[in-house]
Image (tube, rainbow, N blue to C red):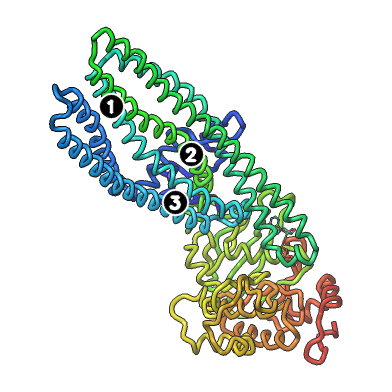
Amino acid sequence: MAAAGATAAPGAPAASGRPPRRPADSRASASPAGIPTLSLSEALAGLRAYVAPERRRVLTASLLLLLAGAIGLLQPLVVQRVLGGADPMRGAGVFVALLMGLVILGAGVSAYGNYQLTAAAEGAVLTARRRLTGHILRLPMADFRRRTPGDLMARVTGDTTLLRQVVLQTLVQAATSVVTAIGALVLMACLDLVLLGASVLAILLLLGLVGLVMPRIRDASLGAQNAIGEMGSVLDRALSAFTTVKACGTEQFEAERVGAAAEDAYRHGVNRARWDSVATATAALAVHLVFLVVLGVGGLRVADGTISVATLVAFLLYVLFLAQPVMALVAVGASFQTGRAAMQRIGDVLRLPIEPPRATDASREMPAAGPAAVDTEELRFDRVSFTYPGAPAPALRSFTLTVPAVGLTALVGTSGAGKSTALGLIERFHDPDAGAIRLDGVDLRCWDLHELRAAIGYVEQDAPVMAGSLRENLVYAAEGDVTDAELRRALEATRLQPLLHRLGDDLDAPIQYRGVSLSGGERQRVAIARALLRRPRLLLLDEATSQLDAVNEAALRDVIHELSGRTAVLAVAHRLSTVRRADRIAVVHAGTVQAIGTHEELLRGDPLYARLAAHQLLPDEGGSARRG
Ligand SMILES: Nc1ncnc2c1ncn2[C@@H]1O[C@H](COP(=O)(O)OP(=O)(O)OP(=O)(O)O)[C@@H](O)[C@H]1O
């Protein structure tokens, strides 16, 4: 299967030398709410990985913010010198000027430090977005399909944004706050140890209470972010089926579904805000309590002459100064819990194995079907069986077929017989559970994935056209430069000149989102032209002619026929008129190739084909096809 030998994303935080883990295998513990959460060390390791590219900026910011903290610490000392002097008013002007200078210098250093820190945080967000996007696009098809685009988008846009706050607060503010607090405590110790003891006791008591609140913030954050992801999924469902929603008149129904998901996100958000407020209020209470304790105990000590008023005032200033790091540390704790939830959601995706470029253990997975065929330049399905993950029954069972290097091979059969699945396995969207598919006698699992796909032109059933220009859509899959003349030839071959004409003969004319400004047939032909420009050695067409009118279909049939004179074409078609001229037709039934032959041979020898032909053969040149 695709997961075999899969590769973890380069730089994925959890991939530091360890094999990639699926979420189910994760050592993540379960929160009281039953939501699995990252352990603290995993979260910190994840954060380090995102910040690593920004370490120089983070270092600069740390030093500057520490310097700003040190400058701040000097201010109470200056005040003490002024008030403690024999004549407080003598030289007051100089001290005030010195104080002003320190304030301005501190503000400047702190502003530049904060700028560097914010830039580093943006850099970490950029790193996370790049890794996540690159990883999502390299996920195996099965893993991608288990997720919804809306939720993945919420992870790339929303969860990564939350990292900014974590980096800003956790990495530097936590460090600088701790250092500043220690500095303040040391200076407070120099002033009076008794007052220090009373202050520390009061702070520890209330910080203990804050610690109890932190897990609640983490659970509420994870709940809120999951709810936002869910809302993205519900919204994506409605927007991607916009036409259906309109046609079915279900705007209100869908709006209510999205509204319900938004309400869920709101409830979680409010819950998080509640616990955030509890933490902040507790920290503020701690600071006030310390201030009152110092005022009370300090007042008594001034009264009995143990310390001077100047020392008490300086100590109180340090208490006020301590308020900032204490409040900051609580905010850091709360924000880290939010970031931890975001990192978990990002990590859940990054820990998924990506498509292996080449399965290293493919040889061990060789079927018991015997040695690899020696024939080259052909595609061969050798007793291939495959069941979609979670599906109750196999889509392919002992599917055996040879597609020569040149010629048109058609797959026909009833709906759900397994035709599209067979094409998907050639693209290695999935790998067979048993048997093997070989190209040039080499198991596809041993091919370099990029090389394999580069050799194939694939026109899928829904033939998407992307937002962008016609040119962008055409050259999308092409390797190397494509000239205008080549583009025009491809348009001509697929009878798309009228479309080009409608676009003012401008290859760079924009095509709307998902090609909604094109007809279904035009979209399909753009996809075919795109596949042709890839100059494939194997062209896979999945019902590529289903949306073409008779004239265009006949024209396209000529193109395919001409192409099949040079290369291998494997076409799935319900319109049997398209495949009448096929060199061989494989009749697929219940996941197995039950008959192979030409149109005439199968009409005579295969009852299923004869039945399909009788029901689905479209009139073509002179209606001759109806003779079956
Ligand atoms: N992603 C999937 N997950 C689970 N089952 C799937 C998936 N895709 C297809 N199937 C199932 O696999 C079987 C074969 O599907 P496939 O799309 O290959 O049929 P088909 O012959 O191409 O049908 P049609 O002609 O209607 O397109 C069907 O039973 C289908 O329901």
Q: Where is residue 198 in the image (x, y as percent from the top left)?
A: 35, 15
Is 19 in front, or is 448? 19
- Say which residue label 2 marks: 340
| Label 2, ligand 1: CB separation under 8 Å | no
> Quarter containing ligand 1?
bottom right
- Say which residue label 1 marks: 184
Tag in front: 1 or 2:
1
- Say which residue label 3 marks: 128
* Proximity of marks 3 and 1: CB atoms separated by less than 8 Å: no
Q: Where is residue 177 in the image (x, y as percent from the top left)?
A: 33, 33
Tag 2 or tag 1, which sits nearer the N-term?
1
What is the CA distance from the residue labelled 3 to the residue labelled 1? 36 Å
- Answer whether residue 391 is visible to the viewer in this image: yes
* Proximity of marks 1 and 2: CB atoms separated by less than 8 Å: no
Residue closest to the far top? 304
Is residue 557 positioned above or below 115 on the image? below
Q: Counting other residues with Cα less than 10 Å from the Cα at mark 3, is it few (<14), some (14-19), or many (20 or more)?
A: many
Tag 1 or tag 3, which sits nearer the N-term?
3
What is the CA distance from the residue labelled 1 to the residue labelled 2? 30 Å
